[in-house]
Amino acid sequence: MARSKKFSLPKKGLNFILHPSSFSLQKGFTLLEIMIALAIVGGLLVTLIYSMNYHLGIAQRHEFITVASLLAKNKLAELEDSPLNVKGDFPEPHAAYHFAAEVRDSSYPGISEIIVTVTKGDEEVKFRELMERAKLKDEL
């Protein structure tokens, strides 16, 4: 029977295999991995920007409705004392807001209707209030 040779690594060869600086693997990411990561980040940023823009638009609309409602209620309170058909602008800091007030007979007998419309650009808010006509005539 023939003797088989034992397999042995030379000491130098073993150090070469186990030593970290001898690895030929490259560190870092491939171009494909970077492109996929950038596509994901880009998609997230587009979604975030769209969402922020949408919610800022809603916040602007709510701000207009709140400010215009308060201005219209104040104008209605003023018109209860002296109801007139008037148009005009609000003073600073609400100079961008405009109003139109109209006093007319309502469909109910003995009742008048005061309508205040507050506008800013394309948007408008209308408030209506009913008052006794006798009260209006006494004040005029």
Image: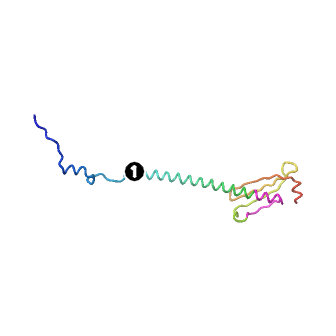
Lateral position of residue 97 relative to residue 34, left or right: right
x 70%, y 65%: residue: 92
Give the residues drawn in magenta, as a range. Answer: 73-90
Q: Position of residue 123 (x, y in %)?
A: 69, 56
Q: Quadrant of residue 84?
A: bottom right
Q: Dot 1: what SS?
A: helix
Name the residue rendered at 87%, 55% in the picture: 135
* Residue 115 horizontal side relative to residue 66, left or right: right
Quadrant position of residue 64: bottom right
Asked whether 20 or 111 is in front, the reply is 20
What coloring was used for the rendering?
Answer: rainbow
Q: Which amino acid type is shown beneath numbered disc 1?
A: Glu
Above or below 3: residue 107: below
Residue 51 placed where, x, y %?
Answer: 56, 52
Q: Is residue 14 left or right of residue 95?
A: left
The 10 Å Cα crowd at callout 1, few under 14, some 14 to 19, many 20 or more, is: few
* Image quadrant where one finds the N terminus: top left
- Please state the total of marks drawn on the protein image: 1
Q: Is residue 44 magenta?
A: no
Going by the picture, which residue comes out furthest to the top? Answer: 1
Q: Which residue is mark 1?
A: 33
The answer to if 74 sits in the magenta stretch is yes
Residue 7 coordinates in the image, percent (x, y): 17, 42
- Single out the residue that lies furthest toward the left: 1
Which image quadrant: the C terminus? bottom right
Q: Position of residue 102 (x, y in %)?
A: 80, 57
